[in-house]
Amino acid sequence: MNHLVRQYWEQGTHVVLVDTGNSYQGLCELIRRKTKGEDGVYFTYTEEHPISFNPFYTDDYYFDVEKKDSIKTLLLTLWKTEDDKITKTEAPSWGYWVETMGYSTLPETWTLSPKFADASLNHVFMGDVSAWMMNQLAGINHDDSAPGFRHIRITPHFVKELDWAKGEYHSVRGRIASEWKREGDKVMLTVTIPADCSADIVVGDQTETVSAGTHTFSYPV
């Protein structure tokens, strides 16, 4: 996403991000050096030293659809508690897209307005949750020490609100798949590893190392 944000900035777009993992700090520092401190501002905060700002300020005294949606998204993100779930079905939310509107792709804005008729219906801009589904629910991850998926980390999470989850990724080495489902008092996990690859299957404090092929595991719940 860093390269996309940089492209937006280079095209003259005013970009505001809520960065929860310092993913964009390096990009901001780069832009700040290039603009001699005029741009690339990066604010950080702690509970002891919080940020204060006016989210309703606009220099042209006009809020178009995009500005309104950006403010709503920012406020919801900042005031979301740690145990809040992504299950609301009113706009703006993922639930609104899936349950209310029936979308199977990610739109460019939370609410599509006739005034914003050129908005894309298939846009990665707000796709962080889909990455979380793949990396955390299905648990498909690369190993930093073995680039190109020579070695794979499968780290699924059996969240209590779900009965099953599955995901697959078509890597340069072949199809990687992970699927788990509840069966009575246990969870069955099935993983597929491409030829000439290996994987660590990490569930809780248990780790199994496997070679290529399809493997099934059972875990008590």
Image (spheres, rainbow, N blue to C red):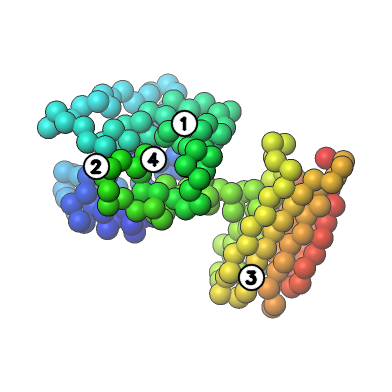
The kind of secondary structure element at disc 3 is strand
Residue at x 21%, y 49% (from the top left corner): 13
- Left or right of 100, for residue 35: left
Name which of mark 2 and mark 4 comes first in the sequence: 4
Name which of mark 3 and mark 2 comes first in the sequence: 2
Could you tell me which quadrant the C terminus lies in?
A: top right
Residue at x 87%, y 41% (from the top left corner): 185
Q: Amino acid at mark 1?
A: Glu
Name which of mark 1 and mark 3 comes first in the sequence: 1
Label for residue 115?
2
Quadrant assignment, res 149: bottom right
Q: Say if 94 sits above or below 189 in the image.
A: above
Name which of mark 1 and mark 2 comes first in the sequence: 1
Distance from the alpha carbon under mark 4 to that under mark 3: 32 Å
Q: Amino acid at mark 4?
A: Trp
Disc 1 target residue: 90
Disc 3 target residue: 175
In this view, the residue in front, 197 or 104, is 104
Inspect this view and state whether residue 33 appears: no
Distance from the alpha carbon under mark 3 to that under mark 2: 42 Å
Residue at x 38%, y 23% (from the top left corner): 49
Circles 1 and 4, Cβ within 8 Å, touching? The answer is no
Disc 4 target residue: 110
Measured as percent of width and height from the top left, residue 29 is found at 29, 48
Distance from the alpha carbon under mark 1 to that under mark 2: 20 Å
